[in-house]
Each structure stands twice: as C-alpha cells, then as structure tokens.
C-alpha cells in the first residue's frame, strides 16, 4: 500500500508542474496531430495495398 501512495504522489507532483509555455505546448499538440494524420494516411494506404494484392491473387 505504501508503494501505491508513493507512486500516486510522484505522479501528482509530476503533473502539477508546468514545464512548457502555452505556445510550445500548442506547437507540440499540432505536431502530434500532424503525426496522427500521417499515421492514418499510411494505414489507409496499407489497407488499400493489401486489398489490391487480394484482388490480384483472386483474379
């Protein structure tokens, strides 16, 4: 039980500090959004590619 309490206090302290300015966090959010969009596009391209392979094999 003391381990949980220690872990909770460490997480609580870590979350309560502000390490970044608001402008830099907005920039990081935008970069992560762009990264997620790229991942979605790549996943969609992979699904389309596998579909094309399946059609060629069936064909």
Image (cartoon, grey):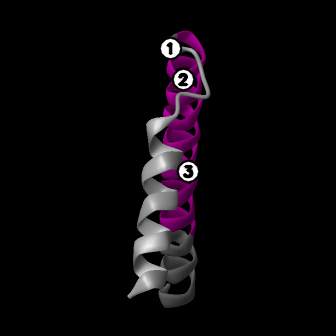
Pick the residue in front: 2 or 50.
Answer: 2
Report the Cα–Cα distance between label 2 and label 3.
21 Å
Residue position for label 3:
39
Residue numbers of the magenta segment: 23-49
Pick the residue in front: 22 or 18.
Answer: 18
Residue 54: x percent and y percent?
50, 82
Report the Cα–Cα distance between label 2 and label 1.
5 Å
Label pair 2/1, CB-CB below 8 angstroms: yes
Closest to the camera, between mark 2 and mark 3, is 2
Q: Residues within 10 Å of mark 3 (few under 14, many from 20)?
A: few
Residue 16: x percent and y percent?
44, 38
Q: Residues within 10 Å of mark 2 (few under 14, many from 20)?
A: few
Q: Main secondary structure of the magenta part?
A: helix
Which secondary structure lies at badge 1?
helix
Q: Residue at x 53, y 47 (%)?
A: 14
Residue position for label 1:
22
Q: Earlier in the sequence, mark 2 or mark 3?
A: 2
Residue position for label 2:
25
Residue 11: x percent and y percent?
48, 57
Asked if the stretch drawn in magenta spans residue 13, the answer is: no
Q: Residue at x 38, y 88 (%)?
A: 1
Which secondary structure lies at badge 2?
helix
Q: Residue at x 45, y 60 (%)?
A: 9
Image position of 13 with respect to 51: above or below = above
Which secondary structure lies at badge 3?
helix
Image position of 26 with respect to 41: above or below = above
Specify the label residue 31 is tagged with: none
């Amino acid at each position: 039980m003391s381990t949980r309490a220690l872990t909770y206090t460490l997480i609580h302290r870590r979350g309560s500090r502000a390490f970044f300015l608001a402008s830099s966090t907005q920039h990081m959010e935008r970069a992560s959004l762009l990264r997620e969009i790229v991942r979605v596009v790549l996943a969609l391209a992979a699904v389309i590619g596998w579909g094309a392979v399946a059609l060629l094999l069936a064909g």
